[in-house]
Image (cartoon, rainbow, N blue to C red):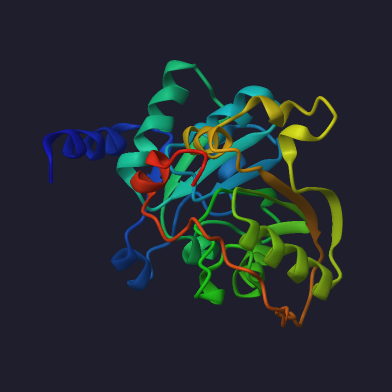
Amino acid sequence: MGKNKLKKFNDLESFSHVFQLSLNEIRNGKEFSMKGKWNELFFKNSQPIVVELGCGKGEYTVGLAQLFPNKNFIGIDIKGARMWTGAKQSIEAGLSNVAFLRTKIEMLTHFFSPNEVSEIWITFPDPQMKKVNKRLTSTNLLQQYQQLLQPNGLIHLKTDSNFLYSYTCEMVKANGYTITFNTNDLYNTTGNDPILTIKTYYEQQWLARAIPIKYLTFELAKREQFIEPDVEIEPDNYRSFGRNKRSELNLSN
C-alpha cells in the first residue's frame, strides 16, 4: 500500500464523522452503536437522514449537505481512499450535517434501523449489465432499501448509463412505483432545481463527451413481492472501456 493511501486510511480512523465496521466484526455479531441512533448520537438533531450509495469521493454528499442544511447526509462506499476526499472537504467546509460510512451496500441493514432513512441517492453506479442482482436499482437491493427507508421514501438515480436508466424505468413500471421526477437529459430540462448546480468529476466527463445525464426519482412503497422486468435492453456501447480509457476518448467515439 502506498504511503499516500496509508495516510488517508489513518486520517479516516481519526475523523469523528467517518464510521467503519469490518466484515469480520459483523460476522462475529458486533453491533453498530449508531444504528437507529444516528440523529440522537451523532447529528444531535431530528432532521431527515439522506444516504448516498457508492459515494466515491463524496462530492455529491458534500454538495447536497451544503445545499440542504436542514437535512443530514451520509455518504456510503467501500473505498476508503476515495471517501477521504469528501470527508476532508466536509471538515474544511465546517459542515455538521455530513457523515461517511465505509461498508458494502449489501450490509446496510447492519447500520440503519427501519424507517431511519428518508431518501437514498444512487449516483453514477456501475450499471452491472451482466449481473442483475448487483445493480443498485435491482429488486434484490430494493428489498434491503425498504427495510431502512421510511414509507414511500424517495430513491434518486442519477446516471450516464442509458442501460441502467432504461432498466430502472422498466423496474419501476413493473412494480407500480410512483415516479416524482423523470428525465433522460437533465441539463436540457427546464427548471432551476438546485441539484443542477452539483456536477461530480466523472459527471463532467460524460457531459464533455456529449453523453446526456439521466435522472429518475420514485417513491419506494412497501412491497411483499418484487417483479424483475423481463425486457431486452440495449447495452451501453462505451462501457467496455476502463474508466481511464473512457475519459481519454474524444466526442466522436
Residue 152: tell me if it is visible: no
Looking at the image, residue 227 sits to the left or right of residue 105; the answer is: right
Q: Residue at x 47, y 25 (%)?
A: 90
Q: Nearer the viewer, residue 214 or 31?
A: 214
- Number of labels in the image equals 0
Q: Residue at x 50, y 49 (%)?
A: 34
Q: Quadrant of residue 135?
A: bottom right
Vertical comparison of 152 with 135: above or below: above
Residue 128: x %, y % from top left: 51, 67
Vertical comparison of 191 with 104: above or below: above
Residue 99: x %, y % from top left: 49, 37
Residue 241: x %, y % from top left: 39, 55
Q: Residue at x 28, y 39 (%)?
A: 13
Residue 76: tell me if it is visible: yes
Vertical comparison of 212 with 145: above or below: above
Q: Residue at x 68, y 58 (%)?
A: 165
Q: Nearer the viewer, residue 48 or 120?
A: 120
